[in-house]
Amino acid sequence: MTWRNPVHSSKEESPNKLIHKSVKLLKRAAMTTLALSALTLGSAAANDDPKLETVYHVYLGTDYVGSVTDKSAVEKAIESKLDEEEEKYDSIELQTNQEITYIPEQVFRASADNVKVIEHLTQTVKTEAKAVSISFGEKPAVLVKDGQEAEQALEKLKLKFVSKEELNEMEEGTPDSNEDSKLISVKLSEEANLEETKAAPEEILSADDAVEFLLKGTLEEKKYKVQEGDVLGSIAQKHDLTSGKLLELNPELNENSVIQIGQEVNVTVSKPLVHVTVEKEQSAVETISYEKEVIEDDTLNKGDIKVKQEGQDGEKAITYLTTEKNGIQVSRTVTEETVTKEPVKYIVIKGTKVTPSRGSGSFSWPTNGGYVSSKVGQRWGKMHKGIDIARPNNLTIKSIDNGTVVSAGWDSGGYGNKVVIDHNNGYRSVYAHLSSISVSAGQTVSAGSAIGNMGKTGQSTGVHLHLEVYKNGAMIDPLSLF
């Protein structure tokens, strides 16, 4: 931060308001008495003549305004104007922007117009105040009331992007209270130049408003390339423009224009007068996703998957160095990385064995053990078309050979839950009274694969499997196959 002119310390204690006002009045009065003092010394003798009257010729700068007989009335009017203006602006001391000079003259007959002169002065005189400008390089300056306000504005500029606590800890070198983030530096893109000046009071901003002005900056025209889904209204909204302003920037367009993807449109964007660059060291614990491994197994049917090992994510501690400009991250680099927990790989076994749908002609027993409780033949006055198997070691029912499931579901003819398998070699097998079914129509099954569980659904005297086998459409005794 560079001062071009000396400024009183912003830490001095403000004087009492009444004393401040008295000093202010003395300053204002001093502007009006220089010419008056020089002339009154030379005309002291003339004042002794009771026939002479004093008139005051009033000048605003070098311009003659008129003459008055009551100088104090003019001073009071100007003072009143200054007081009225000062009420609009908090704690800003005002003065006229041009010097008012009174030149006295002794005349026998006074010819003056107090009202006209006062009216002209109060309408013409402009007010100004001492101020401090803040600028960066050749960019436009922002004005604040004094050096203290300028220093506050520069600090608040930094506090827009870091906390007061972070800034204090960095400047004082105290331990960081936030273990996950440490402020390394806060820098302005250019050195701030502070200069004493004078300005119209309406141009002087508070520290907060000065910060907003510096960050918003100036508007500059820019080309925007139309993207998919854009319309004129959405483009205007993206760039804080009204539709009317957007059309003003693009005179070749109107509100009914159809815009094309890739078309360039004129827009305006804010260009900050200064950038605040913040560097931070940030720590984080991040997840290491587990890897997935697939092991193919040709002994497992194609489509079947078994989980050999469940996966588990790991963790790593990472330290980043981040850089932000006006709150937008522009870089992020890893400075340190430590694995604190190794991930566990997820391993699955995937079957590749292709089960032929055509039977081998070699048949396997459909249950795990058990005995034949009823054979093919006449029973209870009617033909028993298959064999019944009861009391197995477990209830799993298996296909007697490779084949394709023709049907799997409820049979209302007394079979209960029934599965029919075509072995695609002239043989077909039927499994009845199942408590549950684990295959579906169209599915290819291999010899010995589970198709359901033994039960007693339908017309059944107890838990058993009823098995029927057909060859080329004709019923055969299943026992002839085993």
Image (tube, helix red, strand yellow):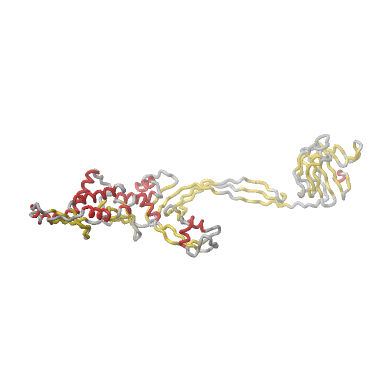
Toward the viewer: 377 or 307?
377
- For the C terminus, which image quadrant? top right
Locate residue 137: give its quadrant. Answer: bottom left
The residue sitting at 25% across, 50% down in the picture is 8
At 85% from the left and 43% from the top, the residue drawn is: 468
Q: Position of residue 303 (x, y in %)?
A: 70, 50
Pick the quarter of the image with the N terminus.
bottom left
Image coords of residue 473 (percent x, y): 87, 49
Left of 152 or right of it: where is 62? left
Foreground pick, 243 / 206: 243
Q: Position of residue 85 (x, y in %)?
A: 29, 49
Left or right: 387 in relation to 331: right
Which sits in the foreground, 78 or 136? 78
Can residue 246 be seen from the camera position used here?
yes
Residue 353's place in the image compared with 394, above or below, is: below
Residue 42: % across, % down: 10, 56
* Frontmost residue, 192 versus 380: 192
Q: Would residue 106 be seen by someone viewing this image from the given angle?
A: no
Query: What residue is at 46 percent from the left and 48 percent from the top?
Result: 283
